[in-house]
Amino acid sequence: MASDRVGAIIKRLRKERGLTQGQLATYAKVTRSWVSLVELGRREKPEREILERVASVLRVAPEILLAAAGYRIGPMPPPEERSLEQILAEAQAVLRRQREEEERRRREEAERIREAVKQATDIVLAREQADLASFVNILARIFREETKLPPEQVQQIISEVWAKRREQIEQRVTEEAKKRLAD
């Protein structure tokens, strides 16, 4: 019976997702007794719209639940011609493809973010190099006119101050990025 099959699939997917019958019912906007009756196979051919909401909550293609419930979906053979194992195997394959697609999208998004950060960093570094050249020229002029320290010591002082300042800037950028990402 088709209602037995859809009920078994819903129950298995619900448990895999770590949901209780009550949670699934709340998220899918049905009663807990509806979920219980379907899982037990005591509800004749659940409504298409409700199965689509349940599929959405369970993060599975609605066609899997619809086909298991006896709805005709594209070229798939009716559920009576497929075993529960075949239907579950199809459901697992769809879930695997969905997970793979989601992971691919995450990787692509991470790569887009990396590329944007690289581009922004390149712009900042180009400006920084121009500013650094001006900074070094100004410092050299000041130190030539106002210091009696050897050039090596002056260079060491500049390096220390620059490194500390750069660290402060990096820390501020990191903190600002965290704040903006949290908003």
Image (tube, rainbow, N blue to C red):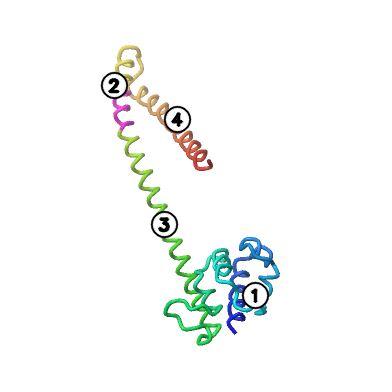
Work out how far the residue at label 1 is from the one at label 4, CA to CA, in angstroms.
65 Å
Q: Going from the N terminus, do you reach mark 1 or mark 4 first?
A: 1
The three-letter code of the residue at mark 2 reads: Asn
Q: Going from the N terminus, do you reach mark 1 or mark 2 first?
A: 1
Q: Which residue is mark 2?
A: 137
Work out how far the residue at label 3 is from the one at label 4, CA to CA, in angstroms.
34 Å
Left or right: residue 114 compared with residue 86: left
**Residue at 42% across / 32% down in the picture?**
166
Q: Secondary structure at mark 4?
A: helix
**Residue at 42% across / 80% down in the picture?**
75
- The reply to whether dot 3 and dot 4 touch (C-beta < 8 Å) is no
Work out how far the residue at label 1 is from the one at label 2, CA to CA, in angstroms.
79 Å
The three-letter code of the residue at mark 4 reads: Lys
Q: Going from the N terminus, do you reach mark 3 or mark 2 first?
A: 3
Work out how far the residue at label 3 is from the one at label 2, CA to CA, in angstroms.
44 Å
Return the residue found at the far top.
146
Q: Position of residue 182 (x, y in %)?
A: 53, 42
Location of residue 10 by image quarter: bottom right
Work out how far the residue at label 2 is from the one at label 4, CA to CA, in angstroms.
20 Å
Q: Position of residue 9 (x, y in %)?
A: 58, 76
- Given this view, does label 1 or label 2 mark the residue nearer the observer? 1
Q: Which residue is mark 3?
A: 107
Magenta residues span 127-136
- The answer to which of 133 and 122 lies nearer the viewer is 122
- The reply to whether dot 3 and dot 1 touch (C-beta < 8 Å) is no
Return the residue found at the far bottom.
81
Q: Which residue is mark 4?
A: 164
- Residue 129 covered by magenta stretch: yes
Q: Is residue 3 above or below residue 58?
A: below
Q: Which residue is mark 1?
A: 38
